[in-house]
Image (cartoon, rainbow, N blue to C red):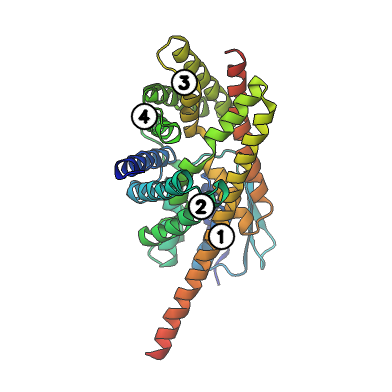
Amino acid sequence: MNWANIIFQFILCYVSTVCFGILLHIPVKAYNAAGLIGGGVWVIYWILYYHRGVDLAFSNLLAAILISLLSQAAARRLRMPIIVFNVPALVPFVPGGQAYKMVRNFAIGNYHLVSVYFYQVVVIVGAITLGFGLGELMNRVLNYVRQYLIKKSRFNS
Amino acid sequence: MLTKRRRALALKTCLLAGRILIENGSNMERVNDTLSRMATSAGLHNFEAFTTVTGIVVGTIDEPHAQVITIRRRKNDLSKIADVNEVSRELARHKIDVPQALAKLKLIDRQQMPRWQNWYEALAAAILSGALMIAFTGNIADSWAGFITGGCGYAAFSYLLRKFKIQYLGEFCSSLVIGILAVIFVKLNLANNINDIIIGAVMPLVPGVPLTNAARDLVSGNLISGPTRGIEAVLTAVSIGSAIVIVLHFN
């Protein structure tokens, strides 16, 4: 883990997030924000999972929560629906590699490895779903706090 | 109080907005939210909307009639969602009135892609495959094969979707193309690792929008459309996987 490696990973995932955005026709104004979210969260995940030894479920959960929070912030700032940011940013986290290895071992007949990879796929998808849910909840709490503070400051002044 | 005609027009506008949103892959909470906002700003009282992935029913409680619209095709065009969002925001701020909003929505609905869009998308899919292949597997030497395979696979997918409008067999056939191309590259000794090529090349086909929407709909408590979207994601993944299994069997 050195800086060159981190920047390389960031660029790869920035590019792939923007490309997935192009496939989904997100507005051109959203390219940069979506790419920054995708690349940045991937770098955090990469450091945690591959270099700090945090386990699969927790690092994916954290990544999904971060994507949800950052997408909400970007959606608020750029006045666009949140889906424009969180779907492209999710693409590096989709368990494509594990799902492929599961299918491959199934085709070859290595049934004991199939269950290992199936478990990984289920854990990742579950963690991402739960993370999006938690992120949504946090967004609502933050909204509530913001509204509350605005009301209070109006009341005092 | 609105006249009967104006009320019918407002309902029509809401229906069209809802159809565009659901067709292009919005989550249900946003659809309900947008529809009720548009109805309020158009002056409809006691507005009710029942939205599912395959159809919408809208009506007002004071009136005996409700209106239905069915949704037959689904594609993922997120810029249309952003456009509808913009229209509903303008309507809420009374910048435009209901007939103008309806005209704008019709324009959004009819919007066609320019002809170069397909090539542009295939290029984007190719870059996505190459970049994610390096990020996942660290295999830089074979990334050019992932680039070509991913681009061809996505081009086949979008061609099938445009010409024949089939939902899951499009993914199946394009995964077959990906698998066959990867096998050819490896058999000709141009590339080394078939697994890495296929992992990269199927990434543009992953069901990102249904997966995200399934999660968000389930969290917001929509028990009809959450599992349905989940099934959509699973079906897509299964059709990709079964095509890959077929290719690997003959390898």
Under circle 1, the secondary element is helix
Are callouts 2 and 1 both on one chain?
yes
Q: Which mark is residue A64?
A: 2
Are callouts 3 and 2 both on one chain?
no
Give the vertical position of B189 relative to A127 (above or below): above
Q: Which residue is mark 3?
A: B193
Q: Is residue B197 visible?
A: yes
Under circle 3, the secondary element is loop
Quadrant position of the N terminus of chain B in the picture = bottom right
* Mark 4 vs mark 3: in front: 3
Give the vertical position of A58 relative to B130 (above or below): below
Q: Which residue is mark 4?
A: B123
Asked if labels 3 and 4 touch by Cβ distance under 8 angstroms, the answer is: no
| CA distance for labels 3 and 1 | 39 Å
Q: Quadrant of residue B14?
A: bottom right
Q: Is residue A82 visible?
A: no
Identify residue type, mark 3.
Asn
Name the residue located 36 percent from the left edge and 34 percent from the top edge: B114
